[in-house]
Image (tube, helix red, strand yellow):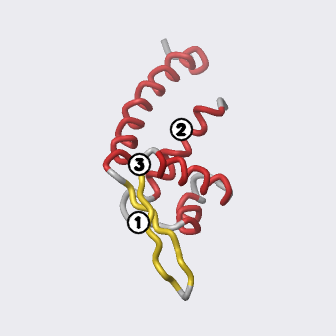
């Protein structure tokens, strides 16, 4: 898979994981695990990139005597998810065209 495409897909997956509620690294990985495997180092690189692009915000909260970073989606992050859904409809249309001979559809 093209690295840029995969990067964009993973960004949207992380945004979707925190769309409904604030979350922290370990929980994000756990929530995504049924759908996609992601290492902690990959996740934290993505979280930093999304923070710099203002698609999420970060706050530190004490939990069991340690600081835990919680991530919240911003309006820009929500817009990115919506843009992705629209883009994906177009990708699926192209996919159906490319694979139509494979399925015998005309």
* Residue at the image point whose x is 68% and y is 56% from the top: 41
Residue 65 x/y as whole percent: 55, 88
At numbered mark 2, what does the secondary structure look like: helix, strand or loop?
helix
The quarter in which the N terminus is drawn is top right
Above or below, 11 against 71 in this view is: above
Task: Identify residue for label 2.
Answer: 8
Report how far apart the C-alphas of labels 1 and 3 lie in the structure. 13 Å
First in sequence: mark 1 or mark 3?
Answer: 1
Task: Identify residue for label 3.
Answer: 55
Report how far apart the C-alphas of labels 2 and 3 lie in the structure. 13 Å
| Furthest-front residue in this view | 52
Q: Quadrant of residue 44?
A: bottom right
Residue 76 x/y as whole percent: 35, 45
* Residue at the image point whose x is 61% and y is 51% from the top: 45
- Mark 2 neighbour class, 10 Å CA radius: few under 14, some 14 to 19, many 20 or more: few
Q: Is residue 38 left or right of residue 22?
A: right
At numbered mark 3, what does the secondary structure look like: helix, strand or loop?
loop
Q: Is residue 52 left or right of residue 81?
A: right
* Residue at the image point whose x is 45% and y is 62% from the top: 58
Mark 2 vs mark 3, foreground winner is 3
Residue 14 x/y as whole percent: 50, 52
Mark 1 vs mark 3, foreground winner is 3
- Mark 1 neighbour class, 10 Å CA radius: few under 14, some 14 to 19, many 20 or more: some
First in sequence: mark 1 or mark 2?
Answer: 2
Task: Identify residue for label 1.
Answer: 22
Q: Quadrant of residue 82?
A: top left
Report how far apart the C-alphas of labels 1 and 2 lie in the structure. 21 Å
């Amino acid at each position: 898979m093209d690295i840029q495409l995969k990067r964009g897909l993973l960004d949207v997956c992380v945004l979707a994981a925190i769309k409904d509620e604030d979350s922290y690294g370990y929980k994000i990985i756990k929530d995504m695990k049924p759908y996609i495997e992601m290492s902690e180092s990959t996740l934290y690189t993505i979280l930093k990139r999304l923070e710099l692009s203002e698609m999420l915000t970060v706050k530190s909260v004490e939990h069991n005597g340690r600081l835990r970073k919680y991530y919240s989606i911003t309006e820009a992050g929500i817009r990115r998810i919506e843009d992705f859904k629209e883009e994906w409809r177009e990708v699926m249309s192209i996919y159906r065209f490319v694979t139509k001979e494979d399925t015998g559809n005309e």
